[in-house]
Amino acid sequence: MSEEVVFPEDHPKRKRRRHPDEGPARRMKSLFSSSFAFIVLLGLAGWFAYTQFRINVGEGEIAILIRKTGLDVKNGDEIAPTIDHKGVQREVLMEGYHFRYPYYWDWEIVKQEMIPKGKAAIRVSLTGENLPYGEFLAKVDEQGNPLTKGVMPGYLINGRYPINPYLFSIEHVEPINIEAGYVGVVTNLAGPIPEDPNTLLVSSGYRGVQDEALKPNLVFYNPYETRISLVDTRSQRYNLSELQDMGFPTKDGFWVSLDGIIEFRVKPDHAAEVYVTYNEDFNGDAIDEEIVNKIIMPNARSFCRIQGSNTLGRALISGDTRQQFQEQFAEAMRNACDPLGIEIIQALITRIHPPVQIAELVQQREIAKQNELQYQQQILQQESEQNLKIEEEMANQKEALVKADQKIVKVTTAAMQKQEVELTQSNQRLAVAKLKLEAAIDEAAAIVARGTADAKVIELNNAAEAAGWKRSVEAFSGDGNQFARYVMFQKLSASYRKLMINTADSPIMRVFESFAPGSQARPSTPPVVPEGSSETPVTTKE
């Protein structure tokens, strides 16, 4: 049996005695402590990641991403071509929370581009290839992304835009206000050159002056792409005497000068053509002076000198020739300026300065002519008043005749109406009388018929009554006296019975019993009483 080796207390090989409290509970407590420490570490790691990796892009801001690691960019590249390259990225982060690993990414938060109301903005591309010679607008692809550096076509209106300042620089521009009475002549500074380079006006989309002008409005535009020139289309006045050279020699060799006013305006439909034809650079957009010097004055001088050289000096002083000269002048100015896009509203010759040598004589002659015309006018006026007076008297006479005729017609009409009324009333009375006569005749016939009928009835009643009396008499063997006594006794018996009511058994009443109604002693043949008679049938004893 080997001897047990005992190590000292502090020896490393000495086995440590287990404490009575050590066991599962101690292990659980140790595990819980480890888990809590892990959660705390995890929370701290999450909080660190949330605070360090988070990109907080506020309202109205954008975040520009800058990659720290990745592929190197070329020397000519201003910005990273793809997301795998180092440098400033094309895409920007919009408002909200975004997370990026700071080891790979850096970022810069800037304000979005704000274009105020009433203004526009021009973008200038800072990246891409250099523009070819003679070009100043950047080339863009189908999506509108720039392919070259330079000014971008178009413009931006008021609003907020998330523009990467490493890609574009922004230039704010003012719109142009085309007021009433003006039109805007548009000149495209870029675009394809038309097939005919010598044409004055080009169609939309080509480089050059556009054939269609802009109407009054507030116009936003890109001044690097388009130039808008304001052309005044309101009426303008020009005094021919301003230059003091509106004179011409007459047919008889006298020098005549004149004053006049010409009112004109540029036709809005021809404003572009007039502008490109007559505008000079030293005058800017104004073309009024060019129109006067190149159109109005040459045509006015031409007419006055040609027409005036065919007219005598004294003829220009008289009213008829002067009026005719002015009308021809206005017509000639309209015919000459209208094809050039200039509308002549009026062309007036206000004054003609005649030759001094003949002015007084011609003036006296004209005064005499005017006096003669005045006297002729007075004569015509007197004749007119005389004719007017005659016409007034004739009118009064006609009016009196008309009133008399009207009165006659009125009286005649009233008499005829009265006659017609009386005739109508007479006819009505006659018709009523006829109707009454016919009614009387009918009524008389009816009365006669009724009388005849009544007489016939009476005759028949009398005949029937007579026949009844006759039969009654025949019942008494044709003895009328006996029948009369019978009727009398019959009448008396009823009245006497009333008198002798208390003596019904007296002998005197028995005498009348045979005559009383209902007695057994009756005639063998009952009497016949006429129809309508009030007599009671009488019977006799057999």
Image: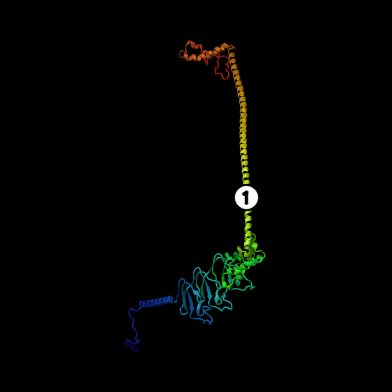
| 357 shown above or below 417 | below
Image point (50%, 11%), residue name: 510
| 296 vs 495, nearest the viewer | 296
> In the figure, is residue 36 to the left or right of 333?
left
> In the figure, is residue 101 to the left or right of 327?
left
Which residue is most to the left? 9
| 378 shown above or below 532 | below
Q: How many marks?
A: 1
Q: Please tell me how crowded label 1 is: few (under 14), some (14-19), or many (20+) other residues with Cα within 10 Å.
A: few
Colour basis = rainbow
Residue 485: x and y in percent read 55, 12
- Which quadrant is home to the C terminus? top right
Residue 293: x and y in percent read 60, 69
Mark yes or no: residue 511 visible: yes
Residue 526: x and y in percent read 57, 16
Q: Which residue is mark 1?
A: 382
Which residue is most to the bottom? 2
Residue 288: x and y in percent read 58, 68
Q: Amino acid at mark 1?
A: Gln
Asked where in the image residue 148 lies, by quadrant, the reply is bottom right
Mark yes or no: residue 355 visible: no
| 405 shown above or below 58 | above
| 57 vs 525, nearest the viewer | 57
| 438 vs 411, nearest the viewer | 411
- Which quadrant is home to the N terminus? bottom left
Q: Secondary structure at mark 1?
A: helix
